[in-house]
Image (cartoon, helix red, strand yellow):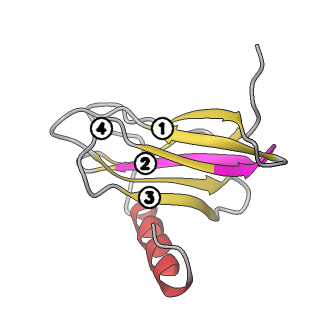
Amino acid sequence: AAYGGYQRSSFNAQLAALEDAGVKNQGADSHMPQVRVTSSPANGRVRVEVSAPVSAPDFIDYIWLKDADTGAVLAAQAKEQKVQQPILTTLVDRGRRVVPLVHCSIDGVWEGSPLEAVVQTQ
């Protein structure tokens, strides 16, 4: 992802266009985003990792994380290479509500459920 000025605005506009393009979470194979939250050395923040299952010939070309309350894009990545297990990792404020999304080349946008960014202890 590009960070700063026009490039960031342009990339976020691309993601918004993908979201607005049609129905979500439909297709022959599920690409539901999976999220893992782990602790971080950054004070008051947690590490959020977003991934999605995919199998050839389909591939994930965009993966992003939004604020569940404002809709603001917190982190995003375009995947130019066809990787089997794409992963986006970012830091967010502990307790922030987020929504993971991916776009796959065949089935379009898959949106996960909103979740609170907290480390689950067992």
Mark toward the start of the polypeptide (3 vs 2): 3
**Which quadrant, please, contains the C terminus?**
top right
Label pair 4/2, CB-CB below 8 angstroms: no
- Viewer-side label of 4, 1: 1
Q: Which mark is residue 77?
A: 3
- Position of residue 68 measured from the top left corner of the image (x, y, whole percent): 69, 52
Q: Is residue 32 above or below residue 4?
A: above
* Residue depicted at x 28% and y 36%: 84
CA gap, disc 3 and disc 2: 10 Å
Label pair 1/2, CB-CB below 8 angstroms: yes
Residue type beneath disc 2:
Val
Q: Residues within 10 Å of mark 1 (few under 14, many from 20)?
A: many
Label pair 4/3, CB-CB below 8 angstroms: no
The kind of secondary structure element at disc 1 is loop
Identify the residue position indicated by label 1 in the image: 33
- Viewer-side label of 3, 1: 3
Q: Which mark is residue 27?
A: 4
Mark toward the start of the polypeptide (1 vs 2): 1
Residue type beneath disc 3:
Gln
Identify the residue position indicated by label 2 in the image: 102
Judging depth in this view, the residue of 52 and 110 nearest the camera is 52
Judging depth in this view, the residue of 27 and 55 nearest the camera is 55
The kind of secondary structure element at disc 4 is loop
The kind of secondary structure element at disc 3 is strand
- In the image, is residue 100 part of the stretch drawn in magenta? yes
Query: Can the viewer see residue 114?
Result: no
**Which quadrant, please, contains the N terminus?**
bottom left
Q: Give residue 11's quadrant in the image.
A: bottom left
- Viewer-side label of 4, 2: 2
Q: Which range of residues does the magenta coloring cover?
A: 91-103
* Residue depicted at x 36% and y 32%: 53
